[in-house]
Image (cartoon, helix red, strand yellow):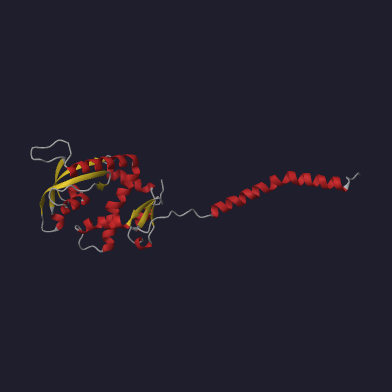
């Protein structure tokens, strides 16, 4: 049997290794890279210190917003603890408002711009819309918190007579109003007001609560500030895991 010269044999082995190396090593390398990628933690979004919760890990909900809403809730639940007032404000006012924004962000932005423009004209006395014989404009509504909504009702209570409110964001709509009359009840929650109001909806108001409630299942709510961890109900955090 003939044998190759030693130099030729080394050359043949080298060519063989050069040919085999990419085939045998590439899958191993790819597997190691894949493992590294799977093990690497996802980057944590950075939020300001004022943020209590996050929606979908990109939209911050500030604690200040919840506390502002809880002031109006306290008029309905004066015996509630501060933590429970925050819980009610988050679940009934603030969180649904944020979820509604995500359903139609462009329509939300347009409605807000329209509301700001009308509010500016009303405050400046330059609104050119139709004027009734009694001097009122917009839609005239009378009632308590259950018919006006907690935020519009609460804002109306605090307004000076004839003063236009700032733009109020409700779930699926913006509102600008001024108080025409106020009738005090034996307790704050029994007080009713008569207001002139302009509405700027960006979602169908007939089904807005149902639409927003269904949307909860497709969004994720996470605690950003540990000091607020006990505020949302556990059932809410369990539900809002971003499942679709």
Q: Name the residue: 32% across, 45% down.
A: 101
Taking the view exactly as shown, the residue that stands out farthest to the right is 1
The quadrant in which residue 79 appears is bottom left
Q: Name the residue: 74% across, 43% down.
A: 19
Q: Nearer the viewer, residue 201 or 235?
A: 201
User: Left or right: 165 with respect to 217?
Assistant: left
Q: Quadrant of the N terminus?
A: top right
Residue 154, compared with residue 125, is above or below; it is below
**In the image, residue 237 lies at what x, y percent?**
37, 55
**In the image, residue 88 lies at what x, y percent?**
27, 56
User: Left or right: 223 with respect to 112?
Assistant: right
**In the image, residue 96 lies at what x, y percent?**
30, 49
Total marks placed = 0
Residue 231, compared with residue 56, is above or below; it is below
Q: Nearer the viewer, residue 113 or 147?
A: 113
**In the image, residue 148 lies at what x, y percent?**
18, 47
- Tell me if I can see residue 205 in this picture: no
The quadrant in which residue 117 appears is top left
User: Left or right: 43 with respect to 13?
Assistant: left
- Tell me if I can see residue 98 in this picture: yes
Q: Quadrant of the C terminus?
A: top left
């Amino acid at each position: 049997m003939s044998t190759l010269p030693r130099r030729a044999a080394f050359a043949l082995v080298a060519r063989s290794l050069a040919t085999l190396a990419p085939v045998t090593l590439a899958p191993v390398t790819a597997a190691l890279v894949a493992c590294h990628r799977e093990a690497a933690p996802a980057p944590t979004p950075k939020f300001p210190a004022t943020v209590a919760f996050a929606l979908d890990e990109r939209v911050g909900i500030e604690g200040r917003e919840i506390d502002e809403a809880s002031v109006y809730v306290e008029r309905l639940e004066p015996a509630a603890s501060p933590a429970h007032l925050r819980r009610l404000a988050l679940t009934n006012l603030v969180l649904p408002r944020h979820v509604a924004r995500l359903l139609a962000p462009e329509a939300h932005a347009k409605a807000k711009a329209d509301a700001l423009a009308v509010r500016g004209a009303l405050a400046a006395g330059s609104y050119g819309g139709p004027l009734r014989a009694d001097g009122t404009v917009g839609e005239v509504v009378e009632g308590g918190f259950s018919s006006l909504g907690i935020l519009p009702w609460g804002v109306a209570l605090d307004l000076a007579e004839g003063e236009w409110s700032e733009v109020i964001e409700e779930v699926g709509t913006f509102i600008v109003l001024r108080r025409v009359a106020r009738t005090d009840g034996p307790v704050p929650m029994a007080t009713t007001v008569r207001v002139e109001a302009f509405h700027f909806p960006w979602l169908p108001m007939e089904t807005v609560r149902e639409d927003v409630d269904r949307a909860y299942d497709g969004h994720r709510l996470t605690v950003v500030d540990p000091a607020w961890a006990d505020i949302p109900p556990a059932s809410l955090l369990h539900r809002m895991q971003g499942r679709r």
